[in-house]
Amino acid sequence: MITILGVDVDAGLVDRWRSWYCPSQQPFDVSRLSAEQLAHVPEGHSIELSPEVRDTFFVYSPGWRILNRAEYLAVPPDVRRALAKTRDRSLGAVRWPEDMVSGDDRAMIRYIEDGVSASRHRDVSESTWASAEQQLPEARRLAGTFASRSGPNCFGTVMGAAGVTGAEDEWMFQEPFEKWLAEVCAPTSRGHDGEPGVVLVWRDRDGLAVHAAVTLGEGWALNKPSQAWCSPRFVWPVKTTVLHSRRPGASVFRYRLTHPY
């Protein structure tokens, strides 16, 4: 058992994380290479990347080639450097399973912890949890946990906390989330953020929900920032949640849970 971002994680899940953070075949973004550089990069492998590996390397667009260690090392040094520079800064140096020293997970932990604060679920008082339980019966169980894979997202976390069975384990789309929101919530104002059961929904300029979190009371909120395997179900102050969840062109709307699901 290790603790990452304030969350206790068992050894079995950490083992799976290693395979997602440092797989034997890794995607490289070649869309920004020159034609001359690209000519030195092998075509690579036509494999279907797992959602977890896609999330690790931010593979959300075309223009990638999948290489193993031998293929990568066979590329001329200047092209290797160019490939490495296309990676997200949080990934650090290019690493392969052979480079991972047994028991040394520091690079992976830095990647997971990059840019986010630890969950503070242990700081929530018993009285706050008790007050939240009627509207959010599963919030305490979910708070300060990692999902077992990529996929489970912010919408499912909010619905799961409110008692929708299995929602926390799904990649919940906007349509079922909006249906649930209309059934059990009513619009409310900013002045209620200190109370439990206020659903915070970020919407883009077209009104599409792009993120959601829920208040626990006494200034706390439950928030899963993304669907990625490395994004836990945090408890943060509401102010921290709102600041961290800002998106260009998006505005936050508030809805109060009017009755248990």
Image (cartoon, rainbow, N blue to C red):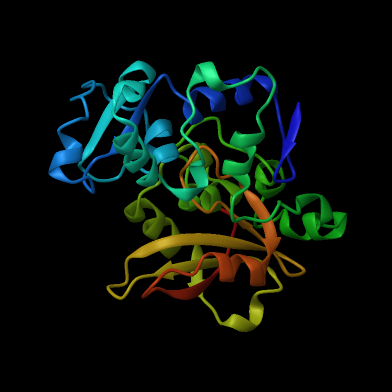
Q: Quadrant of residue 7?
A: top right
Left or right, 80 with respect to 154, comes to: left
Q: Position of residue 78 (x, y in %)?
A: 32, 38
Q: Quadrant of residue 220?
A: bottom right
Q: Work out whether 96 lies above or below 144.
A: above
> Which residue is nearer to you in this view: 151 or 86?
86
Q: Position of residue 21 (x, y in %)?
A: 50, 31
Q: Residue at x 67, y 34 (%)?
A: 106
Q: Residue at x 27, y 25 (%)?
A: 48
Q: Position of residue 189 (x, y in %)?
A: 56, 82
Left or right, 39 with respect to 236, comes to: left
> Which residue is nearer to you in this view: 168 or 256?
168
Q: Residue at x 24, y 40 (%)?
A: 30
Q: Quadrant of residue 45?
A: top left
Q: Work out whether 256 lies above or below 29.
A: below
> Which residue is nearer to you in this view: 197 or 100?
100
Left or right, 233 with respect to 185, comes to: right
The quarter of the image holding the N terminus is top right
In the rendered image, the residue lying farthest to the front is 77
